[in-house]
Image (spheres, rainbow, N blue to C red):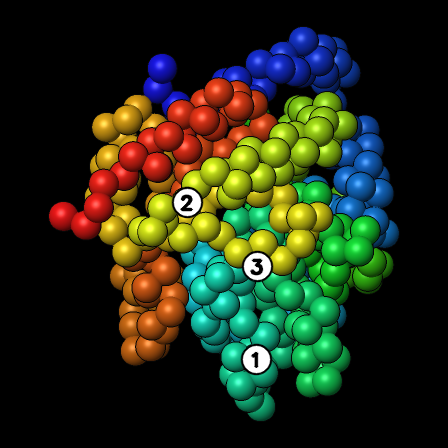
Amino acid sequence: MDVPFLSLKEVNARYADELKAAVGRVIDSGWYILGEEVAAFEKEFAAYCGARHAVGVGNGLDALSLILRGYKELGALSEGDEVIVPGNTFIASFLAVTENRLVPVPVEPDPSTFNIDPARVEAAIGPRTRAIMAVHLYGQLADMPSLAAIARKHGLLLIEDAAQAHGAASAGRKAGSLGDAAGFSFFPAKNLGALGDGGAVVTDNSALAERVAALRNYGSEVKYHHPYQGVNSRLDEIQAAMLRVKLRYLDGDTAHRREVARRYREAISHPDIALPGVTHEEQHAWHLFVVRSPRRDALQKHLQHCGVQSQVHYPVPPHQQPAYAELQGCKLPLTEQLHREVLSLPMGPSLPMDAVEQVIAACQSFGGAP
Ligand SMILES: *Cc1c(COP(=O)(O)O)cnc(C)c1O
């Protein structure tokens, strides 16, 4: 039996009856945009994260972008200000910054945890630095206590890109409640995934939440009155209804991901496969299980030969993408090395434990250097 990287069909089949009932409820309601389902999900998701507000938006990129846009409207950011971002992240973290005519300043990671290195963050702060965008990469919390101390010391905003980290927690406080504001994605493959696109801004800051709620809806608080030049980026009623069902299972799903990760870490021991560093069990929601190998491409081929699908997150770092010609001068050797070495093994809330054993056996049978 082949082991798929992630079967979304199997993920959602587990709740198919409830999801279909929820779709039916929305169809019958006759109300499809910004209604009861979105309002209820916003309340439930904010409570889940331990924050005051959640504002549903169209996707994770818009969540991050609207946080920055909201801060611009509040006068906390202005064009040309610098935002510190991890060098190794999905390109959306950068796009949210540049969409707002802010300047991304990429900083190298701790290669063991893959997350932004606080010591290097402090070294990258300059006179135009106004914010840090921390990404909880692969589901593991960035070092938020250190980043919060740096942000406080230098008067910077601390924003969480929590698109991969629903449910990860530090001393009981969840992703989404660890900075000034957080952006979540509900892309279908994320830990809390809709059946289409979706996202949310989570914050304790009422003024920011109000701005984002207006900006997502044409910059309007009262219909046909527009204090801001907003966008159309709303979470759909149907997607909110799907997310309300799946939010109730999120902790169970995360527990399964942790069990898969525990087994991988216990059983994979190969000189050419480095396991991911884990700061604390509760801080990792295991969106992805990412190993490193100096022979990554050969390892991926070998796994494929054994019927095990794997993926690379991500093959090219943002600063080396053609879209960011202005950043091609950046020297980020650690980031670039990680992009050459990382490989994501199958991981998901419905991955059977016998498939996990097959993945482990495939890793262990990886041959010596050619
Ligand atoms: C998925 C993701 C996003 C963007 O979310 P979308 O819903 O796809 O727009 C942003 N940042 C990170 C780290 C992500 O993994």
Residue 119 disc label: 1
**Label 3 environment density (alpha carbons within 10 Å; few <14, some 14–19, many ≥20):** many
| Amino acid under disc 1 | Ala
Is label 3 or label 1 in front? 1
Left or right: where 348 falls relative to 42: left
Left or right: where 266 falls relative to 269: right
Ligand 1 under 8 Å from disc 3 Cβ: yes
The residue pinned by badge 3 equals 135
Q: Earlier in the sequence, mark 2 or mark 1?
A: 1
Is label 2 or label 1 in front? 2
Residue closer to the observer: 140 or 329: 140
Ligand 1 under 8 Å from disc 1 Cβ: no
| Amino acid under disc 2 | Ser
Residue 139 visible in the displayed image: yes
| Amino acid under disc 3 | Val
Image height check: is 90 above or below 37?
A: below
**Label 2 environment density (alpha carbons within 10 Å; few <14, some 14–19, many ≥20):** some
Is there a contact, CB below 8 Å, between mark 2 and mark 1? no
Regarding mark 1 in the picture, which secondary structure is present there?
Answer: helix
Q: Earlier in the sequence, mark 3 or mark 1?
A: 1
**Label 1 environment density (alpha carbons within 10 Å; few <14, some 14–19, many ≥20):** some
Left or right: where 161 falls relative to 282: left
Image height check: is 279 above or below 297?
A: below
Regarding mark 2 in the picture, which secondary structure is present there?
Answer: loop
Is label 3 or label 2 in front? 2
Q: What residue do we see at 23% from left, 37% from top? A: 301
On the image, the x and y values in percent for residue 137 come to: 53, 54
Is there a contact, CB below 8 Å, between mark 3 and mark 2? no
The residue pinned by badge 2 equals 269
